[in-house]
């Protein structure tokens, strides 16, 4: 059985990885996409209604990520640090974060569908093709982050003293 590097980390190390690697990386990718979308109200590969929907979906995704990151920094990470005596973090906190992550996954799936699985075309501008690649990177990083938390971090918080 393969054991990932993350599975060998302590709960505090996992929290630090999320806070110092995943969160800033995701925020930077969102910033890059936001900059493109702010400069291009219409997207050359999409009908106007779809371009407007993309703007709305991305804004919602960005808001959800921001709120989850604030909840992690303000509630989850301090709870982990404060419960060094082996008490699990409140199940309600983890459930709330898991529900928010499900919403994020749903939005990402809608964006993927709207953008035709991020397929690009040589006829489109390099900037738009780069933006599509950034959307794909964002989705990949989001899925890695959620996988890390839901399959490695949260189970340790629920069952294991640390």
Image (cartoon, rainbow, N blue to C red):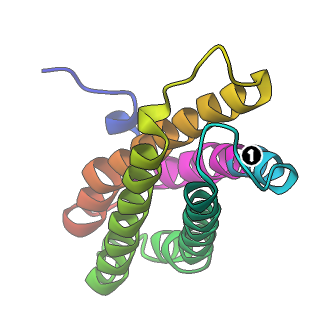
Q: Residue at x 61, y 28 (%)?
A: 133
- On the question of residue 10 being in view, the answer is no
Q: Is residue 22 magenta?
A: yes
Q: Residue at 32%, 27% (x, y): give it.
A: 4
For image coordinates 20% across by 20% down, the residue present is 2
Q: Quadrant of residue 78?
A: bottom right
| Residue range corresponding to the magenta coloring | 10-29
Q: Is residue 60 above or below residue 32?
A: below
Task: Work out which residue is located at the far right of the displayed protein and give it.
Answer: 39
User: Left or right: 37 with respect to 71?
Assistant: right
Q: Residue 13: percent from the left, percent from the top?
A: 51, 47
Residue 144 in the image: x percent, y percent? Answer: 42, 40
Residue name at image x 39 percent, y 36 percent:
6
Q: Which residue is mark 1?
A: 28
Q: Main secondary structure of the magenta part?
A: helix
Query: Does 156 appear above or below 45?
Result: below
- In this rendered view, identify the residue nearer to me: 92 or 123: 123
Residue 99 seen in render = yes
User: Looking at the image, which residue sits at the far left?
Assistant: 1
Coordinates of residue 45 in the picture (x, y in percent): 62, 37
**Residue placed most toward the observer, 100 or 149:** 100
Which image quarter is the N terminus in? Answer: top left
């Amino acid at each position: 059985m393969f054991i990932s590097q993350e599975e060998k980390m302590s709960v505090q190390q996992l929290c630090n990885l999320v806070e110092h690697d995943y969160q800033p990386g995701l925020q930077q990718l969102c910033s890059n996409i936001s900059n493109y979308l702010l400069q291009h109200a219409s997207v050359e590969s999409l009908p106007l209604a779809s371009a407007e929907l993309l703007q709305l979906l991305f804004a919602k995704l960005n808001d959800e990520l921001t709120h989850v990151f604030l909840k992690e920094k303000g509630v989850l990470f301090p709870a982990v640090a404060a419960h060094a005596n082996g008490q699990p973090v409140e199940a309600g906190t983890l459930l709330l974060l898991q529900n928010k992550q499900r919403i994020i996954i749903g939005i990402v799936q809608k964006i993927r569908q709207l953008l035709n699985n991020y397929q690009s075309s040589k006829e489109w501008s390099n900037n738009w093709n780069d933006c599509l690649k950034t959307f794909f990177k964002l989705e990949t990083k989001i899925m890695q982050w959620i996988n890390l938390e839901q399959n490695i971090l949260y189970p340790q918080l629920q069952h294991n003293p640390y």
